Amino acid sequence: MNPSFDLPSLFYLPLTVQLGVLILLSLLYRKRGVRKHRLPPANIFRCTRCRHLYMDSRRVPLSKCPKCSSLNEVIRR
């Protein structure tokens, strides 16, 4: 026996399978509760001596440069 499929069913069957897989994946993703990892806010410093840019996650007004150990002020919070 040779099964005969009409043209619309050959088009809609793969489409519905793909949509079903996407819906299933989105439900699983939502159930797992995947959340974006947020980084703690960091202060950005620029060394006045060596011009090195670096970040420090501590809330301090002055920070030591990791390259030359000079104290620097925050340029961006």
Image (spheres, rainbow, N blue to C red):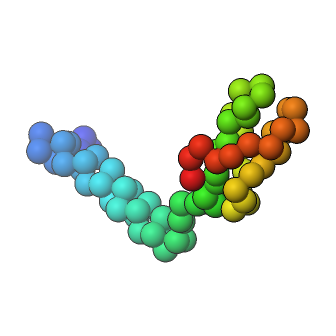
Answer with left or right where residue 59 lies relative to residue 32: right
Answer with left or right where residue 7 lies relative to residue 15: left
Between 26 and 61, the one lying in front of the other is: 61
Residue 65 lies, in percent from the top left, at 81, 39
Between 51 and 1, the one lying in front of the other is: 51
Between 16 and 57, the one lying in front of the other is: 57
Residue 70 lies, in percent from the top left, at 84, 38
Q: Residue at x 12, y 40 (%)?
A: 7
Q: How many marks?
A: 0
Q: Is residue 11 above or below residue 33?
A: above
Q: Residue at x 71, y 39 (%)?
A: 54
Q: Quadrant of residue 30?
A: bottom left
Which residue ends up furthest to the top in the rendered image?
Answer: 50
Q: Residue at x 20, y 42 (%)?
A: 10
Residue 8 lies, in percent from the top left, at 11, 45
Answer with left or right where residue 59 lies relative to residue 37: right
Between 28 and 76, the one lying in front of the other is: 76
Q: Is residue 17 visible?
A: no
Q: Identify the image quadrant of the N terminus.
A: top left
Q: Is residue 76 visible?
A: yes
Residue 56 lies, in percent from the top left, at 72, 51
